[in-house]
Image (cartoon, grey):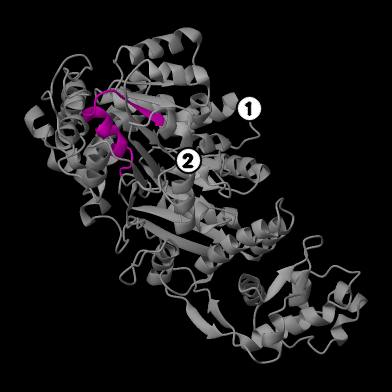
Amino acid sequence: MTHPDTAAPELDGSASALDLAPTPLDVLRDVFGYDSFRGDQQDIIETVAGGNDALVLMPTGGGKSLCYQIPALVRQGTGVVISPLIALMQDQVDALEALGVRAGFLNSTQDADQRRQVEQAYRSGELDLLYLAPERLGVESTARLLDQGTIALFAIDEAHCVSQWGHDFRPDYLRLGALAERWPGVPRIALTATATQHTREEIAERLGLVQARHFVASFDRPNITYRVAPKDSPFKQLLNLLRTEHEGDAGIVYCLSRASVEKTAQQLTEQGIRALPYHAGLPAQVRAANQATFLREDGVVMVATIAFGMGIDKPDVRFVAHLDLPKSVEGYYQETGRAGRDGLPSTAWLAYGLADVVQQRKMIAESEGDLAHRRRLSSHLDAMLALCETVECRRAQLLRYFGQEHPGACGACDTCQNPPEAWDGTVAAQKLLSAVFRLDRERNQRFGVGHVVDILRGKATPKITQWSHDELTVFGVGEDLSDGEWRSVARQLLAQGLLEVDSNHGTLLLTEDSGEVLGRRREVRMRRDPAPAAGARRQARPGGAKAEAVALSDADQEVFERLRAWRAAAAKEQGVPAYVVFHDATLRTVATERPGDLDALSGISGVGQAKLERYGEGILGALHSPE
């Protein structure tokens, strides 16, 4: 399977089952169980299999791994995969071995004997794929080891880690540009799930792939429904989402701080939802155990900081929720992309409020780095705020950020399903900015958003009367809007750069552009948040995944659940994640088509030769067993 001039491993990884010179399509069908390539996969695979370099931008769930796994299986030698994900290498290898692929890894989790076994397998040409962390590749002894075998290709996964201004930056990735110098005849493929034009150029330059073929797939994830909710008791909002739409589903909840992660995980647990925390402050063994539980068991909710998620291959994550505003569109896209890798309907939900904007602006002002760096962070935040505040289709705006266009309203985001109202907020903006201007003279005091809103609403609170702010000309001029509406006005003025926040005290301040509004030289358009749509929306997601994937009949659902129970038992017996046995999408097809024998089962997408031999009788037994 690996070498055109040698015997390929059979289904158990030992003897030949394919032709001596398998084509990429042979490998796709016989090993992975799929009948056809998707998008640019075939072109990418043929480019690398032919010995040429490639830079691949493809969304999570788009099939990036096949773009280097298949060339490694048709070229002579071992494909060397550079991945920053030490904690996930075992699961990645388990998944490949379940397909009959000979795979191994070298990292710090192994003892000396385990490393020696993998090294010997590599030297002997008995590995199809070898996973290494970038830190290990920088060690000379590892380079000497690679020289003792035949390298089919280098795959640089999560290539955005080379970007020095990215939140996943890994310094060791900067050394990977030297791969072509030491092994000049070995093709290289760099892959990432998200990158703007600027980041793509940075990847190409730092990895020496400027002359490589660049493949940019569509960033659209049509099975994901994008929703942004005004933040109002965010935990209650999250709990409602889980109970009405994602009861029993696996999902990820992102929080900004470690304290918030632990508090939210505890609150969910108290509500009967199995939730686990994950952040960099937890002991390594706790993080590893929680991650393993999330990957290997059904229906677990992981509450985490952004330290969790890169490279997570779990296909049945049904929702990703953000309780705090992401710092950039890139981060948001990458994090939400961990939902619905199997192509089935999933939700990306974000609770967003005024405090988020204030907090992020303050963090940027206090961040390390020069003025240019802070401006770059501000531009990233501005783009994220624009996505939150848009009255247009969110999917269209998201794709536009990555330089792609969407043909029209997607029907699968909140602004399409429940359109917000755009209104002329110029007068409201003038009132709020006037209040801030008058308070700015009280420079020794701290007056936050709540105080400004109380003034506009004409509330004679003790603090207002103490400072005689009930005597200001703007006192009571905003009774036409509610407290929440005024907070939305303030939030949108911050998002549009017409207000800023004092990083020391959290006080609202005017900007250079504020005068344009106060001087009646600039109109301010705003978004009025619509009332939440009544009832759960789990079953109806226009424009989402394929119609046949949305719902099963009651009878098929019963069969599907029986198959999931069989899969869970098989996975537990083998000590691997359930998705290594079969994806949900494959089980759903089995539940609906109900194949009667192994030959019929072999025609189901996702059932390759190795899985047919290993699991075929078991899945047919579960399928046709009495209830």
Left or right of 467, for residue 337? left
Question: Which dot marks residue 201?
Answer: none
Horizontal side of 602 relative to 554 (left or right) equals left
Can residue 597 be seen?
no
The residue at the point 49 percent across, 50 percent down is 202
Q: Which residue is mark 1?
A: 283
| Circle 2 residue | 310
Secondary-structure class at tag 1: loop
502 or 400: which is nearer to us?
A: 400
Q: Is residue 368 magenta?
A: no
Q: Is 74 inside the magenta-drawn segment?
A: yes
Q: Residues within 10 Å of mark 1 (few under 14, many from 20)?
A: few
**Residue at image x 78%, y 65%?**
502
In this rendering, the answer to whether 323 lies above or below 506 is: above
Residue 210 in the image: state x and y as whole percent.
Answer: 40, 48
The region drawn magenta spans 63-81
Residue 530 at least partly seen: yes
Q: In front here: 169 or 352?
A: 169
Q: Amino acid at mark 2?
A: Met
Of residues 414 and 385, the one drawn nearer to the viewer in this rendering: 385
Depth check: give the residue in front, 374 or 574: 374
Residue at point 42% right, 75% down? Answer: 419
Identify the element where label 2 is drawn: loop
